[in-house]
Each structure stands twice: as structure tokens, then as C-alpha cells.
Image (cartoon, helix red, strand yellow):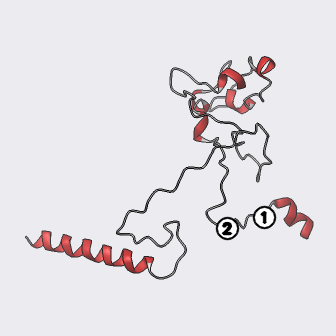
Amino acid sequence: MKKFLISVAAVAGFLAFGVSAHSDGAATLRQGTPITSEAEAPKMNKVENKDVKRIRNYPEQPPTIPHKIRSYEISTNANKCLSCHARTRTGESQAPMVSVTHYMDRDNQVLATVSPRRYFCTQCHVTQVDAPPLVENEFIDVEHIIKAE
């Protein structure tokens, strides 16, 4: 019984902390919804489908996916991305080839096919939606920093 009361007190304290932490005026993505309530889900924005390469913000940044991939299957048995982006398919699809680093194993040995650790494309590559940013971005590209000096 003693452990139960301690647990109830801890949960009540946590809930009180959550409410008070939210009411301190800090900016959050909850947009004023108390932590004890479930906010209504925002409407989903449309995925951009422009097939235009975006500029990367930093070296080694994975490129974003400039087209819809909603019905693409990416599983251990199939990878729809490779039907256009595989080395052997780029001639007919005119899609950019998967990076040569995706054809290397952990020891940097070149493989004939995409490495299993690079096979699940959406672990790193994401589509973009036509939506305003949720938070302000203060990123400054290294080129601007170098030129400012």
C-alpha cells in the first residue's frame, strides 16, 4: 500500500509539473494545448511533386525526394526507388543514380548491388511538403559565414 501511495504521489507531481511547465510561456508545437489534453491533428499538407533538385544545406546532407512516394514499396523483398535510381536503370529513367557510397559495405568494399545497410531509402531521404515552417530557422550556410569574415 505504501508503494502504491508513493506511485500515485509521483504521478500527480509529474502531471502538476507538466501543466506548470507548459504554462510558463515557452514556445512549443502544442500551440497552447495543455499537456493533459490531446490536440486535434493538423491537416496534412500536400507533398511537393516538382522533380527539382534542392540545394543542400551542409556537406553529406542526404538529398530530399522531389516527388511523391506514397504508394512506393520499400521492404526486404522490393524497393520501388531502385526501379529508377539504380545504376542500371538511370539511362532509361533519367533519374539521378544512387550515390556510389550506397554500393559499399562497412569496409568500403564496392558491391555489385546496393548495400543492405543503405537499402531502406526513407531512413535518410524524405519528401517535402508545401507548408510554412513550424519553427523559425536560424541556420546560416557556411558560405555566408566565410564571406562575412
Q: Residue at x 72, y 47 (%)?
A: 61
Q: Is residue 23 left or right of residue 113?
A: left
Is label 1 in a helix, a strand or a loop? Answer: loop
Q: Cβ–Cβ below 8 Å for labels 1 and 2?
A: no
Q: Residue at x 19, y 72 (%)?
A: 8
The alpha-carbon separation of the residues under discs 1 and 2 comes to: 12 Å
Q: Is residue 100 left or right of residue 16?
A: right
**Which quadrant holds residue 104?**
top right
Q: Amino acid at mark 1?
A: Ile
* Residue to which mark 1 is pinned: 140
Q: Residue at x 85, y 66 (%)?
A: 145
Task: Kindly identify which numbered label has been placed on residue 136.
Answer: 2
Q: Nearer the viewer, residue 137 or 1?
A: 137
Q: Nearer the viewer, residue 133 or 55?
A: 133
Q: Looking at the figure, which quarter contains the C terminus?
A: bottom right
- Residue 18: where, in percent of width, then height? 37, 74
Give neighbour class at mark 2: few <14, some 14-19, many 20+ (Cα, 10 Å). few
Give neighbour class at mark 1: few <14, some 14-19, many 20+ (Cα, 10 Å). few
Q: Is residue 116 left or right of residue 24?
A: right
Q: Amino acid at mark 2?
A: Glu
